[in-house]
Amino acid sequence: MPLYLAVVHYPCSNKQGEVVTTSITNFDIHDIGRSGRTYECEAVYLVNPVPSQLWFANRVLEHWTEGAGAEYNWTRKESMSRVQTIEDLVTLTEQLEAKHGRPPVYIATSARKTHETWGYVAMREKMEADPDTPWVLLFGTGWGLHKDLMDEVDYILDPIYGAGDYNHLSVRAAVAIILDRLRGEKWHESKL
Amino acid sequence: MPLYLAVVHYPCSNKQGEVVTTSITNFDIHDIGRSGRTYECEAVYLVNPVPSQLWFANRVLEHWTEGAGAEYNWTRKESMSRVQTIEDLVTLTEQLEAKHGRPPVYIATSARKTHETWGYVAMREKMEADPDTPWVLLFGTGWGLHKDLMDEVDYILDPIYGAGDYNHLSVRAAVAIILDRLRGEKWHESKL
């Protein structure tokens, strides 16, 4: 099914839980673009309402898709060509609805369990059973997606727990793990 | 069992397969430190023979474990305090053998299948069945661990395949996914 990633820079929380706009970082573009491409996402959206931020991101993308970077590293060109910038989730909803003929379904991710959440096996089955819907995984930056957005999404995934009580993964690591669980080969079914 | 990560900067391959030393990047220290802490690794080693590289890494680590960063963000302090620098794998072997009373077992990772490799279920069972051995996961940088090192390790894990034929993950993403498979909660056994 068509799967999209959205790296959300607004509305996010700061350390105090207040709503803020965070900055796009170069490493997010590269790492999340590569993970998105590896797990066959249709596109990775960098969601940010600030024009200078979108300009910066587009400049990086242009370097790797059309500039000197494209010639240096074709695998990077391939991943970067699926990364796009967008002002907000309202615009994203409109675009995906126009493309797919139905509204996208938003699945939020969080390191903290503040709402009812879904497990990965159940969510994967749900997504695979509905292959015509555009599914969008939302990842927060800063101190995470703001509460107001969490209240509005369609589903929320279980937090990723590691091997102990510390779960402060980077957004880049969380994206990789969640894609592997929802979309990767079923490595856990192989005993070899 | 005691699990260690080693991010190897030498001996790595360049694009042409020649042996090179790569640079330590700030993002690796943060992201891999956080993933290592989340999945309860004893330590994350940055392996680099170049003194100025180790000086740089130690300066970053000091900022977050003792400097202003430690006060700003205690979760970062906690992950950074398990990141260490080391000159080479010979020294690492000596240190771990002295600490654990037995030599470490090295498990290499690679995006390409050039040797016999192990699946994740089998490797996890093997590790859990031998809880006194220090296990070390080796991750390459640049274009990956050099062939000479791959020939010498004890085990090699299967490459991570995504949903298609493109598998160019960042080392930060690969670390996160592999730790989740070898050490994470068994999310795939839950149907909820």
Image (tube, coloured by chain):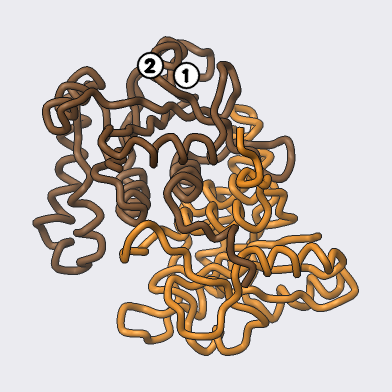
Chain colours: A brown, B orange
Q: Badge 2: few (under 14), some or many (20 or more) residues near its Cα, within 10 Å?
A: some
Q: Chain of mark 2?
A: A
Residue at horizontal 59 percent and vertical 32 percent from the top = B68
Quadrant in which residue B85 is drawn = bottom right
Residue that lies at the very extreme toward the front in this rendered image: A129
At 57% across and 89% down in the image, what residue appears? B151
Residue B52 on image: x %, y %: 51, 66
User: Height in image: B187 above or below A142?
Assistant: below
The amino acid beneath tag 1 is: Asn
Q: Amino acid at mark 2?
A: Val
What residue is disc 1 on? A14
According to the picture, the residue beneath numbered tag 2 turns out to be: A20
Asked whether the viewer can see residue B76, the reply is no
Residue at left offset 39%, top offset 41%: A128
- The x and y percentages for residue B130 are 83, 68
* Callout 1 crowding tier (Cα within 10 Å): few <14, some 14–19, many ≥20: some
